Amino acid sequence: MVAAGLGESAIGAFERGFTLLSAGEKGLLGEESIHPATDVPNYLMVASEHPEWNAEFLAQTAVIKLNGGLGTGMGLQKAKSLLEVKSGETFLDLIAEQIAHLRQSTGAKVRFLLMNSFSTSEDTLAALADGPLGDEEVEMLQNKVPKIDASTMTPVEWPADPDHEWCPPGHGDLYPALVGSGWLDRLLEAGVKYAFVSNSDNLGATLDGGLLSWFAESQAPFAMEVTRRTEADKKGGHLALRTSDERLVLREVAQCPDADLDFFQDISRHRFFNTNNLWLNLPALKEALDASNGVLPLPVIQNAKTVDPRDKTSTAVWQLETAMGAAIECFDGATAVEVPRSRFAPVKTTADLFALRSDAYEKRADGSVGLVGVRAGKPPVVKLSDEYKLVDSLAELGAVPSLIEAESLVIKGRVHFAEGVVIKGNAEFDNCGEVAPGTYGS
């Protein structure tokens, strides 16, 4: 890691994770050690108390977008944020527009950072240079860590492709990256006190004036945006309270003992899940990092993989990761806020992207994208068969039908939509070839 130019904070975080792995510490969080979080402030209450931007707080704020993902699950070999979303514009285009509009409309120079990975850096910076932010310095590089040979507990060797010897350390690397890059000190020196962090593929996660004022006035060191779990979210990390000290904690499925999985997936018991939209008090973060030698004591997730992810017969390895939301347990006074589902709209699959490209979503004057008003915050449910798992295959579907009045759309096999197809209610198309203009559904 030293030879690869990685900083002390990143090395310290990996060393801590490796020590836990070597000691057989699984980092499990059993149901007997926690109880459900119930008393969570609501966004509607918060927003009503802070209806307008606070210029002072805005000038002290940075927006950080996590942009390290390649979207390989959808067949991409570039940053997912470079995918087209609306009318030729990408996630990155829209994010840059949002920042530029916010600066212009408020007069506050809100700081902006992208946490890129080694894989996304070049393409992302090239794309940004042609946008409203120009050549502004915005990059913070994510670190990388060695994969551990499961049989020898040493860094794995893979001469066929040495890049496979490394892996990303999860978005918990935000904290070592802020320290190692020097950005934390630079922001503090510039008078920045607050940071809003979210994923670049979540266009619902925009800087919100009400939430900013609420967070700043609360003087909380850390806040997590959570929303109500549905059946679709039962495998996602949920909020809880640790019984021993009543601290808020984030429990990921990898931290749940097998015997407690039913409790983990009980959405009526554990009602809130992490949207990965976080608010950080940067002076408090600096203090916590200084007190722990630059390494927050985050739970370490131990993933059993193979060194070549496409070759299941290749060497078995451990990949060590941390989640940035898990830092909620590292701060006295950390809190959470329940937000509407509209602030959690990530694109994880081609079905998500297909829906986002439809007229059920609109681009607004400030660069944000959200559901049109008549949908009352409820997205259409789109399901695509495996033929459309990769982004390039979406072109085979032809024009995107109107989904403004759609409840659900299921597509199986060969289907091609002509211009002028409208879906109302629920509709399913099963290997039916060309779909002529008209209204479909029940």
Image: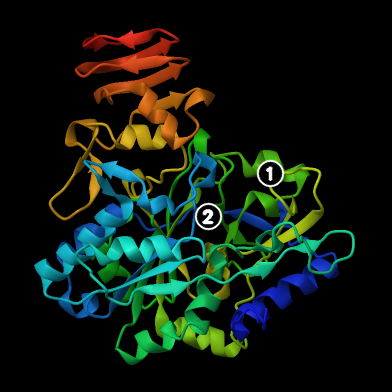
Q: Is residue 400 above or below residue 219?
A: above
Identity of the residue drawn at 52% across and 66% down = 118
Q: Position of residue 270 (x, y in %)?
A: 56, 46
| Disc number placed over residue 37 in the picture, else none | 2
Residue type at numbered disc 2: Ala
Q: CA distance from mark 2 to mark 1?
A: 39 Å
Judge whether residue 332 can be spotted in this image.
no
**Left or right: where 286 falls relative to 421:** right
Viewer-nearest residue: 250 or 218: 250
Residue type at numbered disc 1: Arg
Element marked by disc 1: loop
Tags 2 and 1 touching, CB below 8 Å: no
Identity of the residue drawn at 68% across and 78% down = 1
User: Comparing marks 2 and 1, which lies closer to the viewer?
Assistant: 1
Mark 2 nearby-residue class (10 Å; few <14, some 14–19, many ≥20): many
Residue that badge 1 annotates: 310
In the displayed orientation, state which residue is furthest to the bottom.
189
Q: Position of residue 321 (x, y in %)?
A: 64, 63
Viewer-nearest residue: 169 or 27: 169
